[in-house]
Amino acid sequence: MLLRLLLLLALCGAGSAAMVVSVSLRGSWRIRSGNGSLELPAEVPGCVHSALFHQRLIQDPYYRFNNLNYRWIALDNWTYIKKFKIPFDISKWHKVKLVFEGIDTVAVVLLNNIPVGETDNMFRSYAQCSFSWDWGPSFPTQGIWKDVRIEAYNICHLNYFTFTPIYDNNIQEWNLEIESSFDVISSKPVLGQAIIAIPELKIQQTNSIELHHGERIVKLFVKIDKSVTIETWWPHGHGNQTGYNMTVLFKLDGGLSFEKSAKVYFRTVELIEEPIKGSRGLSFYFKINGLPIFLKGSNWIPPDSFQDRVTSALLRLLLQSVVDANMNALRVWGGGIYEQDEFYELCDELGIMVWQDFMFACALYPTDQDFMDSVRAEVAYQVRRLKSHPSVITWSGNNENEAALVLNWYDIQSSNLSTYIDDYVTLYVKNIRRIVFEGDQTRPFITSSPTNGAKSTAEGWLSENPYDPNYGDVHFYDYVGDCWNWKIFPKARFVSEYGYQSWPSFSTLEKVSSKEDWSYESKFAHHRQHFTDGNYKMLHQAELHFKLPQSADQLCKFKDTIYLTQVMQAQCVKTETEFYRRSRSEIVHGEGHTMGALYWQLSDIWQAPSWSSLEYGGKWKMLHYFARHFFAPLLPVGFENEDVFFIYGVSDLHSDHKMMLTVRVHAWSSLEPVCSETTKPFVMKAGESALLYDKPVAELLRGCTNCTRQSCVVSFYLSTDRELLSPTNYHFLSSPKEAKGLHKANISATISQQGDTFVFHLKTSAVAPFVWLDVGSLPGRFSDNGFLMTEETRTVFFYPWKPTNESELERSFHVTSLADIY
């Protein structure tokens, strides 16, 4: 599995008057297999799999069992070949560089058959999950996955440019540190000026600079006048994402100049770990611009095995879906990749906070000199590249490696344990942590996730129990316990991984399967599931509260089962997330003050069962629609304890609000509420959770004619006299499989168009839980879905992602509710 990059250069005599030239080598190349039996065109950036697919030498790698059929591709050695002419006289330039932004992964570079370089680390400027995970296939790609070019220059060249806004808390003043690296060829000093302009902040600053031979770092410091009002960057839902346009112009001797433009954002971030009254542990939460923020979101994995398929449009679609679901944070997981610049730029623009893992996950790593040199270069480069982004709020050394070592996932003999502990501290503390703080002191560094944070540090960087809910962050999964029972969940400070699996919709699976695959017991269904007993665990969890599909028609049963797994997943994650959100302001038995909930995982890398809320390509699962509700800025949360029904109010708002709570009880057999009550007006405090309502279930039902746990369901919402302030939430008084009076609902839809939006006017004959509106493979999303329909009519909007029309929607539209599958 060795990649060879062969460049055949012919010199050209044309001259150039420029001081710096850059020639792109992206575009058309050729690739050749190890024994020469295959040679074909290839695009750069790209990979071998994509080249073979575009030449129709292989099918879609994701189709059926092709991840097995195409293993030969990764096992072969491949050569990328490019013949080109340099459009200038190379002899007239002091330095000519061949620059690869990204090579995947182990490769030797030859120029005119002469070796000129080697690579072994795709995370530097020239992934682990490529070799499969429990949610993805094994496609170890090979190729030139980023840009490649030739640069030539005389005198000097600008290598990189980065900057860091810094807030001086002592004098309450913003400053800006700008760092640039130059490769100076001239033996004589190069004099010039650096001109910094930020017009909106009334900044126009000129600095004299003098560059000497060699690699030179130029640091510039900009003090921002206190009299200038600076608008800070805020996470989504908490304020604007204000940025300021900056240009830095370097004007040097001989007419040489370099200009860089960037958007500058100002924000502060703190990780607060301090004692909590009534608890033996420490807090663990983030302050942005001095305000405690509850992190609401998910975990980011690469949205495709093949990076050339990850387009700007796909990134924007996925990240827009994040904020559309009221999320404000993503954790870039340490087993994937450091994402492309555009990902972080979009997170800046949309207000998505990023917890950035370094790319080390679920493994024990060496600490030999060559590996450490590679790691140090990787970390320094990524910190330099990403530190100017306000969206990046913390660095994390690895995914689950502290827990793996302490809990001995890999059966290390006790006599060898001290060696592995030394290696862990050497890699993550003495190297990665040190390099991070050398390059960036404006955001916190967490050694691992999960971790006990300050407690792990005090215990030599490895805590006896990294899953202690009283410290740091935890990862939590339980597929055996009843997910409707909130008592199984940890009342932790911060939960950075949790979740349940579901299958993607049939329209997504249909593209990569054949008729014989459309059964939950098929070879395809078992092959696509990479989590041990995952298909069984989904049905086990579903069967606790729902009747399993029993249709005699195999395809109908498969579709119903897919639907039920999505219902189960959405309800489970809803219950768990609402527990974490209502725990933010209380300490119970020493536990609580939860300030983050990041479920696993946001999107899919291929079409298969997983923990995701977005299917491969971006289609919303039922879970993502539920997330739009359970991550709402103002939310009533209902639950039971010892036969008493409680409702908490949860607010992420910045100010107090006066409101009322309305509680309604509905019979499954009637579209009219059986009874309703509204509280007196109360004030919901900003940034808090609080008990709003408690009543024994027996007393609640006693006031509602002929209502029992099995025959009725509860809904509730927050409002003023004139305005609905929260989503309408609901609470099942019994498992739906025990429901009495629940009838099959005949739901019809009339579709009309309003501009680019389509309006679905729904009408039902009966109360319908988990109403699922589906338009097949037509790209877009509904304003709401998977909802409990308790009234005869309801209006839902469809927002297409590509042009469509009413007739296409009518042909593709299908509606399902829970009683339909019984």
Image: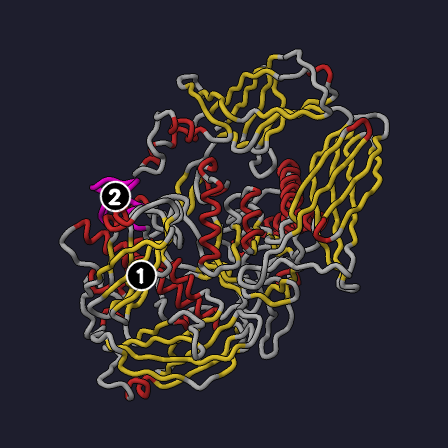
Pick whichever, 683 or 372, lies toward us: 683
Where's residue 67, x and y in %? 36, 36
Where's residue 266, x and y in %? 67, 56
Pick whichever, 726 or 556, lies toward us: 726
Q: Residue at x 70, y 43 (%)?
A: 247
Q: Residues within 10 Å of mark 1 (few under 14, many from 20)?
A: many
Q: Residue at x 80, y 32 (%)?
A: 252
Choose the circle earlier in sequence order: 1 or 2.
2
Q: Are marks 1 and 2 in contact (CB under 8 Å)?
A: no
Where's residue 599, x and y in %? 45, 59
Q: Residue at x 22, y 62 (%)?
A: 747
Q: Residues within 10 Å of mark 2 (few under 14, many from 20)?
A: some
Between disc 1 and disc 2, the foreground one is 1
Taking the magenta stretch, the answer to whether it contains residue 510 is yes
Task: Give the residue type at disc 2.
Answer: Lys
Taking the magenta stretch, the answer to whether it contains residue 804 is no
Q: Secondary structure at mark 1?
A: helix
Please determine whether, in this image, residue 479 is positioned above or below residue 655.
above
Pick whichever, 59 or 138, lies toward us: 59
- Left or right, 337 with respect to 386, comes to left
Distance from disc 1 to disc 2, alpha carbons, whole Å, reads: 24 Å
Residues drawn in magenta: 505-523
Quick one: quadrant of the C terminus? bottom left
Task: Give the residue type at disc 1.
Answer: Val
Q: Which mark is residue 523?
A: 2
Instruction: Read off the residue under disc 1.
Output: 567
